[in-house]
Amino acid sequence: MRAEMFVKPVRRLAVAVAVLLAAALPAVAQQAAMPQQSAGPGAAPTVAADPQLEADVMELSHKLRCLVCQNQSIAESNAPLALDLRDQVREQLAAGRSKNDVIDYLVARYGDFVLYDPPFKATTLLLWGGPVLLLVGGAGWLAWRLRRRQGELAAMHGLSEAERRRARELLAGDAKQSSSESPESRS
Amino acid sequence: MIPELGHFALVLALVLALVQAIVPMIGASRNRLALMAVGRPAAQGQFFFILFSYACLTWAFIQSDFSVQLAAANSHSATPLMYKITGVWGNHEGSLLLWAMSLSLWTVAVTVFSRNLPDAFVARVLGVLGWVSTGFLSFLLVTSNPFERLLPAVPDGRDLNPLLQDPGMIIHPPLLYMGYVGFSVAFAFAIAALLSGRLDAAWARWSRPWTTVAWVFLTAGIAIGSGWAYYELGWGGWWFWDPVENASFMPWLLGTALMHSLAVTEKRGAFRSWTVLLAISAFSLSLLGTFIVRSGVITSVHAFATDPKRGLFILALLVIVIGVSLLLYAWRAPKLGGGGSFSLVSRETSLLGNNVLLSVASASVLLGTMYPLFLDALGMGKISVGPPYFESVFIPLMTPVVVLMMFGPFLRWKDDDLAKAVRKVAPAFVASVLIGLGTAYAVDHVSWRTVLGLSLAAWVVLASILLLVGRITERAGAAMGARLRSITAAWWGMWLAHLGVGVFIIGVTLVGSLEAHVDVKMQNGQHAELAGYTFTFRGVRDADGPNYDAARATIDVTRGERAIATLTPEKRLYLAQGMPMTEASIDIGPFRDVYVSLGEQIEDGSWIVSIYYKPFISWIWLGCIMMGLGGVFAAADRRYRRLAAREATVAANQRVA
Amino acid sequence: MKAKFLVPLLLFFALAGFLAFGLTLNPREVPSPLIDKPAPAFSLARLDDPARPFALEEMKGQVWLLNVWASWCVACRQEHPVLVRMAQQKLVPVVGLNYKEVRGDGAINARGMALEAETALAIERAQRWLDDHGDPYVLSVLDIDGRVGIDFGVYGVPETFLIDGEGRIRYKHIGPITPESLQQVIMPKIEEVRRAG
C-alpha cells in the first residue's frame, strides 16, 4: 500500500524533471559545442591554428607529468620544459602519429615517470589490483562478521531463528521506535 | 623583544601541555579528583600562551620586523595588511603553530563542553590531547622555531608566495586545520575509552557531535581550497589528486565513515572495535597528511615549505602517537564484543556497508599516493600516479556508495524487509537511470561517465524527495506543521548532506562533459566567440598593486544583444620574488561560469586570452555547502543537549550515592 | 591479544618504514630509461666552428662525458670549477652540450627571433661565458631549440651523461657535479666502464 502511495508523486516528479531538463539542457549543450571560428572583421584569431588538434594536444598533455614542476601536468605548467614537450606532442600529433606513439616517444626518453596514468605491468600490479583486493576483502570481512554476529547473538539468547522471528513479529509495533532505544537507556 | 616573549610563551605552553598530559592521567588511574581537575586549567592556560605566542608572531609580520627570519622570508613591507596576517601560516613554522593552536582550541572546547561527562573520562581525554600537543609543541621548539632571529636584519622581506596572496587562502588553512585537527577529539575520546575499558554506546554518543563538527570544518576547508585552485591557478581546474589534496581527502573519507559508524555503535553498541579503529585511523591520516606536507617526501605543487631533516622528527612523532594507539587498540579491542542485535537487512547493515566502501576508497587513495614511494624505496623505478588513476579507481568505488547512501535511509533500524524496501525505491531507481540516459542524450554527450554521473545525481535527488515525502506522510492525520516539526534537526542534516552529494555530482559531471575552452590572440576591439557568448577585448591598462605590477584587460561579455558582464583578468608580476601570476576574472552564474584569464602579450601587440565556459561548476561548491550545513544541523540536534543534561543528573546522583 | 587486532599496527609500521626510507630519497631525481642504451644520434653545430657539425661517432672508442650546460644556468656556475679541474688533470674528455642558450634564458624574449640571429647571440653569450669561467670542454655543441636535450631526456641543467666507447649511455648524473660526487660516484663509474671496455 505504502509503496504505491509514493509511486505517484515520484512519477509526476520524474516527468516534471524530465521536461525541465529537456528544455534547459540542450541550450547548455549547444553552447558547449566546439568554438566556431567566427569569420568576419574583428574576430580574434585563435592561438592554435587548428583548434581540434589543440584540443587533442591538451587532452594528452593533461596525462603527462611535467618533470621540473612539483606535480603538475605539462598542460597546466608553463615551465620551459613543459612548453617544449607540449610542442613535441603537437608536432607529432600534427604529423599524424597516434597518441600511443607520442606516449612511447616520451617514455623512451623520460621513463614511466612522465605518465600520470601508470601503465599496467608487473611493478604496478598491486597499484591497480590493490583497490579490487581491498574491496573484495572489505566486503567479505563485513559479510563474515555480520553472519558470525547473527550466530553469536542467536546462541547467546538461546533462541532459534523461528522463535526470534515470532518475537520480532510480536515486537513489530515497537520496531519503529527502536531508534530511540539504545542499550544505555537501561542504565 | 616581542618575538622573544612569543618564544617564551611557547615554552610555557609546552610546560602546561606536559602538565595536562601527565597529571590528569595519574588522577584518572588513581581516582583522585584533585589531580583530574588540573586538566581543565592546564588546557586553558596552554591555549592562552599559544594564542599569545601566535599574536607575537603576527605582530612581527604586521610590523615588518625583518629581524625575525620567518617574517623576512614570508612578508614584505609593501604586502597588504591582510596578507601580512595570513603570511604567518604561509610557511612551515607558522602553519605548525596554527596546527598547535587549533589543537589547543579544540582542547579548550572539550574543557568547556564536557561538564556532563564523567571526570575520569574527561581527564583521560585531556591527557591524550595533552600528549599530542606536547609532541607538536616540542616539534616546533626543537626543529622549527618560528621566532628565529635573523642578524643582521634585512632591509626588506622576500614576500609571501604570490599564489597564497588570495582571499581564498585567508580562510582555507584555518578551516582545513580545524577539520584535520578536530579529529583529534574523536581520537582522544577513543583512546580514553580504550584506557578506561568503558567503550560503550555513551562513548559513541559523546563522540558524535565532535566528529561531525570536525568533519564540517574539513569539508569547508577542502571546498575552499578547491575553489582557490579553480580561480588562482588560471585554467579552471578544481581538483588535481595532488598528494597534499589527498592528504586532506583521506581523513575526510574516513571521517565520513566514522560519523556513520558512530551512529551504528550508538544505536546498537555494535562494531565498537571497528568504530574505535576508524577514530584512530581518521586522526592518524590527519597526522600522516601533516607529515606528507611538511616533510617533502612526496613532492607536490603545494609543498611550499619542505625540509626532509624535520621529516625525521615528525615521523618519530607519527610513530609514537599512532604506534602507541594501535598497540593499545590491539590490547584492548579484543575484549569488546557483543552489542545489540540487528538483522542482515537493516539500516545498520547499510551503514556498515558504506563504511567499508568509504574505508576502501580511503585506502585506495592512500595506496595511490604512496605507491610511487613504495616502488622508489624498493628500487623498482619511478612512476607517477595521477588523476587518471584516481578517477578510474574512485568512480567505481563511489558509485555503490551513492546508491547505498540513498537506499539506507529507507531501511528501518534493526530489521526490515528487503523486498518491501526495494519495491519502495525501485521506480525512483529506474527513473534515475532513464533520466541519466535522457539527459545525456539531450545534452548530446552520451559517454558512460556522463550517463553514470547524471543517473546517480538523479537517483540522489529522486530518493531525497521520496524520503522527505515518506517522512512527512508517516504520521497520518497530524497537521502539516506538526509533521514537519516532528522531524529532528539530525534528520534534516542527513537529508541535506545527502542531497548535497547529488548536487555535487551534477556539477562534476556536467562541467566535465560540457566545458569548452579557447585560446585567442586579441587586440583592441577584436572579439571571440565561445558557447554562444561574445568576448570583446577593450584593451589593457596598468593596474599596479602595492607589491606587484599588473596589466589589467577589460573584456566585455555579451550574448546576442544582451550585456552579460565586464571581466577584468590581470597578469601580475610580484616584485619581491619576480613571480608572474595570472588573476582570472569570472562571471559566476547559477548554471555556468564564464572564466577568462590573461596570458602574455605577443610580438604584434595582441594578448593571449584563455576563455573557458564552465557549465554548472558552482554546483560543486553548492553541494559542498549543503553537505557542510547538513553536518551543522546534525551536530546541533537537540538530542545531544537533552541526553547530555540527563547524563549529568545521573552522574551527579551517582556521585551523591 | 588476538593476532588479527595487531594487523593495523603492523600495516602502519610497514608504512612508517617506507616513509623513513622515503626521507633519504630525492623526489626530484628521475632515473633515465636510457641507461645502457645507445645514446641518441645527433648532429649539432660546434660552438668554436658553427659551420662544422659534430656527431656522436667522432667520440667512438673513447669513454667520455656529455655535460649539459648554459650560461644562464646558476647551478652550472657551481659545478664549473670542478669541470675545469677535471680538464686540467685530463681525467676524462668532456663534451659540452650548450642547452637553449638564448631561449632558455627567462630574461630574454626570444620569441620571433630569427634562427640566425639567435644562433649568433648564443655563440656570443656562450663563448663569453667560457672565456670568463674557463673552458673545460673538448668542444661544445649548440642545442639551440633543446631538441637534442629532449632526446637525451634532459629535464634540468646541469646534467651529465657518461658514454662508453660504443656510444652507449652508462650513467646519468643529475644536478651539479661536486668534488664529492666526482670522487665517490662518477670516477668509479668511469673506471668501471673503462675496465669493461
Image (tube, helix red, strand yellow):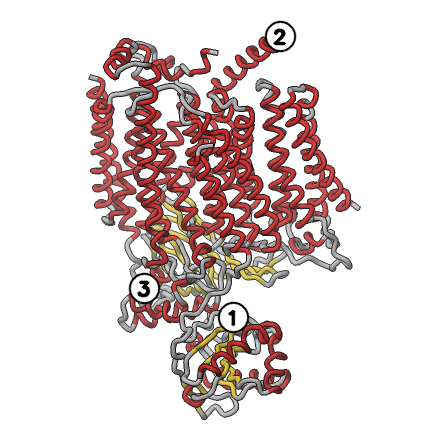
Give the side of residue A47 with respect to residue B602, left or right: left
The residue identified by callout 1 is C174
Alpha carbons under labels 1 and 3: distance apart: 37 Å
The residue identified by callout 3 is A51
The residue identified by callout 2 is B656
* Nearest to the observer: residue B588 or residue C37: C37
Chain letter behind tag 2: B
What's the residue at 37%, 27% (across, down)?
Answer: B495
- Do pointers 2 and 1 mark residues of a single chain? no
Alpha carbons under labels 2 and 3: distance apart: 81 Å
Give the side of residue B595 with respect to residue B306, left or right: left
What's the residue at 40%, 54% (across, down)?
Answer: B386
**Which amino acid type is shown beneath numbered disc 2?**
Val
Q: Secondary structure at mark 1?
A: strand
* Nearest to the observer: residue B539 or residue B56: B56
Q: Are marks 2 and 1 in contact (CB under 8 Å)?
A: no
Image quarter in which the C terminus of chain B is found: top right
Give neighbour class at mark 3: few <14, some 14-19, many 20+ (Cα, 10 Å). some
Q: Nearer the viewer, mark 1 or mark 3?
A: 1
Where does the image place residue C196, in percent across and percent down from the top left?
45, 81
Q: Secondary structure at mark 3?
A: helix
Residue located farthest toward the right when viewing the structure as drawn: B1
- Do pointers 1 and 3 mark residues of a single chain? no
Where does the image place residue B319, in percent across and percent down from the top left?
55, 44
- Do pointers 2 and 3 mark residues of a single chain? no
Alpha carbons under labels 2 and 1: distance apart: 74 Å
**Relative to B396, residue B189 above or below:** above
* Nearest to the observer: residue B366 or residue B182: B366
Whether residue B216 is visible:
no
